[in-house]
Image (cartoon, rainbow, N blue to C red):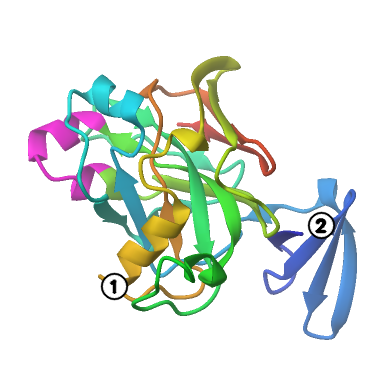
Amino acid sequence: MRLVRIDKALNEYGIIEGDKVIALGSEGFYSYNLEEVKLLPPCLPTKAICVGLNYRDHIEEMGDKEPEEPTLFIKPSTAVIGPDDFIVIPKMSERVDYEGELAVVIGKRAKNVSLKDALDYVLGYTIANDVTARDLQAKDGQWTRAKSFDTFLPIGPWIVTDLDPSSLDITTYVNGEVKQKSNTRHLIFGVPRLVSFISHIMTLNPGDVILTGTPSGVGPLKHGDTVTIEIEGIGKLTNRVK
């Protein structure tokens, strides 16, 4: 099942069936052609919990050591944008990078969840771009400023509920050229471990997202670029840069 939010009336939630969106409005069900609706971010997270250094090739690329436990940081809800929205390069940064990632969407309140039960708390999966001001990340030492600018968290285009996240191809394109290409089987910490681990630190609310990390090949974006992230079984998330 593919779940969406669309810009119709009161930002309705819907289910995609073929080339139609079946939306639930305040007075019943409505059907729209997919091509005639604007897709919004498919969920409204109270927070995005992100995992750094979770692909070995990216660790080598960044010159870091493999972590013993997941390395976490948070992006604010104000960074979230949807498909086809603009990523805005902030004036205070001279190097803004793309980072294509699989995102886990939480379906129910999760606290102190066991590894065995972790996937029971997952609603589904979507695509995310962990946009990063790389120069500010290096300058600050910690990552909050570099990760938190408005528009620095594109997610979408929808949530896929019936998906095994353990072996999915992930590819990032900039202006049609392949920049990242990997598979989620190369994750150091898989989805169940991440959900369980994070839930022992903070409560995960319905709609919160976990970004699982990015593979090697991260690189800069510039004004006028188009970045597309494709994940097997989900689809494509495209955003332009200004």
Distance from Cα at disc 2 to Cα at disc 1: 32 Å
- State the image coordinates of residue 166 (x, y, percent, origin top left): 55, 44
Would residue 6 be visible to someone looking at this image? no
Identify whether 215 is placed above or below 23.
above
Q: Nearer the viewer, residue 174 or 209?
A: 209
Q: Find disc 1 in the rendering and name its residue.
A: 202
> Is residue 139 part of the magenta span, yes or no?
yes
Q: Residues within 10 Å of mark 1 (few under 14, many from 20)?
A: few
Residue type pointed to by label 2: Ile
Q: Quadrant of the C terminus?
A: top left
Residue type pointed to by label 1: Met
Q: Find disc 2 in the rendering and name its residue.
A: 16
Point 44% across, 33% down: residue:
186
The answer to which image quadrant residue 85 occupies is top right
Identify whether 87 is placed above or below 33.
above
What secondary structure do most residues of the magenta stretch adopt? helix
Q: Quadrant of the N terminus?
A: bottom right
The answer to which image quadrant residue 218 occupies is top left
Q: Is residue 92 left or right of residue 216?
A: left
> Is residue 28 part of the magenta span, yes or no?
no
Identify whether 203 is placed above or below 179.
below
Instruction: Determine whether the residue tagged by mark 2 lies in a helix, strand or loop.
Output: strand
- State the image coordinates of residue 18 (x, y, percent, origin top left): 90, 50
Exactly how many numbered labels are in the figure?
2
- Give the mark nearer the N terminus: 2 vs 1: 2
Give the extent of the magenta segment. Answer: 134-146
